[in-house]
């Protein structure tokens, strides 16, 4: 069996290089053939990949993109070059633990209804990540808004803002996180591509939504584990170990995240449902803007303007 690993580099040279070495070491344990396809979207020369990576690793195919059109555009380009039977869409900031790939392949073999799966995840310190298992909904957005208001008033969290995986067993879910999404080639062929309406976020939700609409199931696999290096400082370079070069910080931008969320939600909700969700999110960002104004005692601050720009973006969808 041949495995295809796809990733996009955006100013993460050191992490990409380590991820490639980790993939090679883990696939070797399974005895499968494999390829690694990398699209380079980097905007800074210091953190861009060298074509020498493909020259010294015969299993790597390298695509330097002429401009950064977002993760989704880069990933759709990689989809056209896939030759493996199982496709791994991975972020560069992960490490596959021993046995992870073998357990994922075994799950596919024993669950013929599974079209997309994802491993369990933890941080480098061993703490398990919080894993979302459902699409955004009116209920989840109201809980998030209520949580924000209660935190502002009482300075403490009262309840979880969304449904999370409890890890009691393998889990049949709506969607999986894009840190390590694994799908059958036949599922990818049927989907074709991620809608170009999306730019950076919610690509995994879209793939899972399309797979489920085609009759496939989506699962988290409890006993397959990856380490996820996440939440970097917005102002500094970050080294996760002496061996793993640096990652240039890439903090999600709220207006891009929310715009892609509502672009995705157009495929799931009616116009009325979408409008309700936009109203809830508008209230949330108005609250953020008012909190910023109160803090700095100025009507116009960089923070308040940023929050209001989010509102503009979501209503443009």
Image (cartoon, helix red, strand yellow):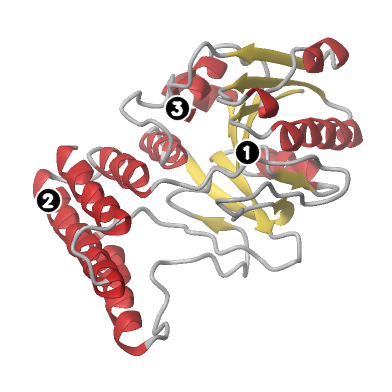
- Per the model, the C-alpha gap separating discs 2 and 1 is 32 Å
Residue position marked by numbered label 1 in the rendering: 91
- Per the model, the C-alpha gap separating discs 1 and 3 is 14 Å
Residue in view at x 55 percent, y 14 percent: 65
Badge 1 density bin: few <14, some 14–19, many ≥20, Cα 10 Å: many
Looking at the picture, how far across and down is residue 276, in whole percent? 13, 57
Residue position marked by numbered label 2 in the rendering: 275
Badge 3 density bin: few <14, some 14–19, many ≥20, Cα 10 Å: some
For the N terminus, which image quadrant? top right
**Which callout, 2 or 1, points at the residue further toward the start of the chain?**
1
> In the image, is residue 313 above or below residue 198?
below
Camera-side residue of 270 and 149: 149
Instruction: Kindly identify which numbered label has been placed on residue 70.
Output: 3
Mark 1 element type: loop
Badge 2 density bin: few <14, some 14–19, many ≥20, Cα 10 Å: some
Q: Quadrant of residue 49?
A: top right
Residue extending furthest toward the left: 272
How many marks on residues? Answer: 3
Judge left or right: residue 169 versus residue 161. Answer: right
**Which callout, 1 or 3, points at the residue further toward the start of the chain?**
3
The label nearer to you, 1 versus 3, is: 3
Mark 2 element type: helix
Mark 3 element type: loop
Looking at the picture, how far across and down is residue 285, in whole percent? 24, 60
């Amino acid at each position: 069996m041949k495995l295809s690993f796809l990733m996009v580099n955006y100013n993460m040279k050191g992490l990409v290089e380590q991820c490639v070495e980790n993939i090679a070491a883990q696939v070797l344990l399974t005895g499968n053939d494999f390829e690694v396809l990398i699209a380079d979207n980097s905007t800074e020369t210091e953190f861009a990949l060298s074509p020498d990576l493909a020259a010294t690793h015969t299993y790597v195919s390298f695509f330097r993109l002429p401009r950064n059109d977002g993760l989704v555009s880069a990933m759709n380009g990689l989809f056209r070059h896939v030759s493996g039977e199982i496709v791994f869409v991975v972020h560069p900031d992960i490490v596959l633990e021993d046995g992870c790939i073998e357990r994922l392949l075994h799950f596919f073999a024993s669950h013929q209804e599974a079209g997309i799966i994802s491993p369990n995840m933890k941080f480098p310190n061993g703490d398990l990540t919080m894993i979302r298992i459902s699409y955004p909904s009116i209920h989840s957005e109201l809980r998030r808004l209520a949580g924000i208001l209660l935190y502002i008033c009482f300075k403490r969290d009262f309840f979880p803002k969304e449904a999370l995986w409890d890890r009691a067993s393998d889990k049949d879910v709506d969607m999986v996180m894009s840190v390590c999404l694994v799908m059958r080639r036949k599922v990818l062929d049927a989907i074709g591509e991620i809608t170009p309406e999306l730019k950076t976020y919610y690509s995994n939700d879209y793939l899972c939504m399309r797979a489920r609409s085609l009759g496939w199931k989506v699962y988290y696999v409890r006993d397959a584990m990856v380490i996820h290096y996440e939440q970097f400082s917005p102002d500094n370079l970050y080294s996760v170990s002496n061996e793993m070069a640096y990652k240039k910080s890439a903090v999600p931008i709220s207006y891009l995240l929310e715009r892609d969320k509502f672009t995705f939600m157009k495929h799931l909700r009616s116009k009325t449902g979408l409008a309700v969700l936009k109203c809830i999110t508008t209230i949330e960002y108005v609250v953020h803007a008012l909190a910023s104004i109160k803090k700095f005692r100025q009507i116009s601050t960089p923070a308040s303007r940023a929050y209001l720009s989010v509102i503009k973006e979501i209503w443009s969808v």
